[in-house]
Image (cartoon, rainbow, N blue to C red):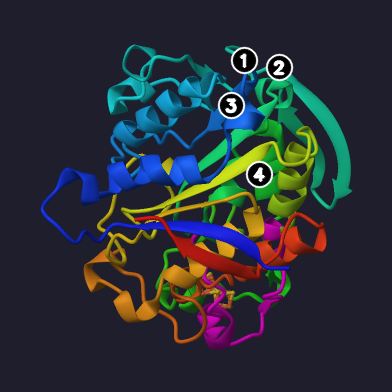
Amino acid sequence: MPAQVLFSSVKFDKYDADATLPAKFKRLIDRMEMEDIVKDKWTAVKMHLGRKIGYSTIPPLFVKILVDRLRDYGAKVFVTDQIVSGTENRGYTEDYLGVPVTPACGIMGKYFYEKKVNFKTLQFVDVAGHIADAEVMIDLSHVKGHGSCGYGGACKNLAMGCVTDRTRQQIHHLEGGLTWNENNCTHCEACLRNCNYHANKFNEDNKYQVNFHHCTYCQHCVKVCPTGALVMNDQQYKDFQTGMAISTHEVLKTFAPGHVFYINFLINITALCDCWGFTTPSLVPDIGILGSKDIVAIERASLDAIRTEDLILSGIPQGLALGKKGHLFERLHGKNPFVQLEELEKRGLGTQEYIMEEVS
Ligand code: SF4
Ligand code: SF4
C-alpha cells in the first residue's frame, strides 16, 4: 500500500505571510498527527546542525516552529546531533529554541548502546544513548547531495548522525572499488592528469590512493592507464549505502512502531553535505517541505522532486563535470542514490510507493 507524504510548497499565491513556507509548515505539522504519540514523551528532534560557517542547514526559525508545536502537544523536547559544539554560532541555542541542544552520545561522546552487525568493515552500530533513550524521534533533515552516497536526507541523518565516531568510521571504510597493482604501475601519472575530481594521488610512500568521497567511478583513470594497473569494481560504492541502511535500521529498532516522524526540507539544496562547514550555491530552486511516517517514501518523494531539468548550473562545484546518466545526484557524484532506498525497503522499513498530498 502506498505511504502518505505531505508536501508544502515554497511557492506562494498571495502577498501574505500566511501563504509562505513557515506558516504552511505549522499546518503540515498539525496534519502529521503527532499529538497523541508525543504527549508526555521524551521527544528527540534529530537534526544535522552543520559545521563552521555553513548556512544551508534548516533555519532556526523552522526548528522553533516545530519545537513550539511539540511542546504545545505536551512533549518533553530536546534537539540533538552527533556534534553540537559551535551550533550557537548558527543560531541553534537553548535560549532561542527554548529546549536543550544536546550531543546525542553525551557531552563526552561515550554514551551509546553497541549493536553487533557484522557487515564487512561495519562491525558495530553504536546507537547514541540519548537517541535510544528517547521515546519519540522527529527525523528533521535537510536534503542535499553527498559525495559518498549521492544523496543525504532522512536516512543519512540517522545512519551517520545517531551513532558514535567509531560507527561513522566503519561505514566510511566500506567505501572502495578501485584496485591498484603496484607491480604494473610505471608512475606515468596519466591517471592523475585525467581525473577531473582530484580524487586520486600518490602518497608520500608512492602508493596510489583514492578519496572515494570525491571519486565518481567515471573510470577515466582506468581507461588511460597504459599498463592495466588499475581495475574498477564500480559496484562497491553501494556498500556505503548498504551500511547506512543497516545503521538506520539499528537506530529505528530502539523506537516503538509509529514513534518516528520524518520531515525533509528541500531548500538550499546544495551539491555537498552540510558537514563541509561551508555552503555552495543551490543546485535547483527551493522546493518546499515534505512530511511522512515512512522513511522510504519521504526519501523517494524527495529524490523525485529534485530534477535535472531544474538544474542551476552555478550550483555545480567548480571542476566537476556532470555525468550523463541517472538522477541529478548520480550525474554529480557518480553514485546511484536510490540504492539506499532499496536497502531500507529490503529491511522492511517502508515503501517507495507514495501518495503526495499538498498542505497549503
Ligand atoms: S574513477 Fe574517475 S573520479 Fe575516480 S579516481 Fe578514477 S578518474 Fe578519478
Ligand atoms: S596511469 Fe597506470 S601506470 Fe600510470 S601512474 Fe596511473 S596507475 Fe600507474
Give the residue type that dot 1 points to: Gly
Do labels 3 and 2 touch, CB within 8 Å? Answer: no
Q: What element carries label 4?
A: helix
Residue at 64% across, 34% down: 162
The residue tagged 4 is 159
Q: Do the residues labelled 3 and 4 touch (CB within 8 Å)?
A: no
Query: For the N terminus, which image quadrant?
Result: bottom right
Amino acid type for the residue under numbered disc 4: Ala
Nearest-to-viewer mark from 1 and 3: 3
Distance CA(mark 3)–CA(mark 2) = 16 Å
Residue 4 sits above or below residue 262 on the image: below
Q: Distance between the residues labelled 2 and 4?
A: 17 Å
* Disc 2 to disc 1: CB gap under 8 Å: yes
- Residue visible at 81% across and 57% down in the picture: 348
Q: Is residue 114 magenta?
A: no
**Is ligand 1 less than 8 Å from the beta carbon at label 1?**
no
Q: Give the range drawn in magenta.
A: 213-241
**How many dots with numbers?**
4
Report how far apart the C-alphas of labels 2 and 1 lie in the structure: 6 Å
Earlier along the polypeptide chain: callout 3 or callout 2? 3
Residue at 80%, 38% in the rendered image: 253
Callout 2 secondary element: loop
Which label belongs to residue 106? 1
55 is higher (above) or lower (below) than 300: above
Residue 111: mark: 2
Q: What's the distance in space between the residues labelled 3 and 4, CA to CA?
A: 15 Å
Instruction: Name the image quarter holding residue 41.
Output: top right
